[in-house]
Image: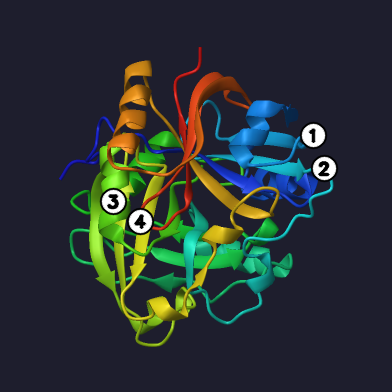
Amino acid sequence: MSEIVAPQGSPLAVAVVGARDLDASLRFYAEVIGLDAGPEVRWEGATFERLWSLPSGARARCRMLGAGTSPVGRILLVEFDAAGLPAGTVREDICTRQDAQVFGLANLNFYDADIRATTARLRAAGYTFWSDPTQHSLTAGVGNPIEVVFDGPDGVAINLVELTSTDPATRIGQMRAFVERHGRTRTGFTPVVTTSHIVRSIPRARAFYERVLKMGALIDEVMSADRVNVFLRLPQGARTHICFMQGNHMFGKIALGEPLNYADRCLDLVPRAHAPNVGYLAQAFELATPAAFEAAIRACRETEVEFVSEPATAELPGLGRRPHAMVRNPGGGALQWLLGPAG
């Protein structure tokens, strides 16, 4: 069983989060998660306005966070100032609900060496957890991780995972070995290793990740265990198709989810996930070469993917000058930001 199923694929490079208070959000990701923060950047101009569909005069304060020089699993915090346009929320106003049935970009996932100790520490610091740490029972070839979810800044759900399997014949065992080789942040976490994307059609969403980004399917299962539904705040008896998409790295995976018997109860976050709103707004993927970027754009056009922002070249915060375009994933409508190489 190979660790990497898609050697040419583009993993998640950056999760874009709209911040209510840039400094407060920065403290969480830098001090709690232990990511390294780049310098503050001011973002404005015509290209910025087109990218985020904002009025003239809009601007933003930004900070990029990551683990050392790794280009995978970073977080771009953006505090928008949209010329008087009020900021709403993507998910913050539903954090008190006792359920979490949604469509859209749903969480950021970090590996943790001791999930029970972390849960006790963060609960004492005032963070709200959805449940106690829960162990999954997946198929023999996958392994059995322990997970917990809590509400992070800006209404973003933070999913912690402890990789308990050591068997190198399992996916979890392979991931654990990779983390041990790769190292952790100064507070014991990792960059974003997986991020959840809940869609209306896994086949359509998966086709985008495969054809445009050359990712491959790592895990493909149906979840229905009662304890898993409690942990994820899903309805009793819920059945969810999950499909983990992987690029050329063990981090930056996409956990696709499709509700099989409760879709009519799901709140659609996609119409809320736009600037200047607060919350998880977009996933960004870096194409390694100019030819790969052009091929990704061509694949989008051939499959009639919706372009929110046409290809352009601009200086991007924390990323340098590079070609880029914003599109919507056809499986559910979430924003996918395509990035060409810097230069």
Q: Nearer the viewer, mark 2 or mark 3?
A: 2
The reply to whether discs 4 and 1 touch (Cβ–Cβ < 8 Å) is no
Residue at 44% over, 54% down: 333
Amino acid type indicated by mark 1: Gly
Tell me which numbered mark, 3 or 1, is placed earlier along the sequence: 1
Residue extending furthest toward the top? 343
Q: Are marks 4 and 3 in contact (CB under 8 Å)?
A: yes
Q: Which residue is mark 1?
A: 57
Mark 3 lies on a secondary structure that is helix
Nearer to the camera, 107 or 141: 107
Q: Is residue 238 left or right of residue 268?
A: left
Query: Could you tell me how far apart the alpha carbons at marks 1 and 2 are, in whole angstroms?
Result: 6 Å
Q: CA distance from mark 2 to mark 3?
A: 37 Å
Determine which residue is flagged by label 3.
206
The residue under label 2 is: 83
Q: Position of residue 175 (x, y in %)?
A: 33, 47
Colour basis: rainbow
Residue 267 vs 269, above or below: the answer is: below
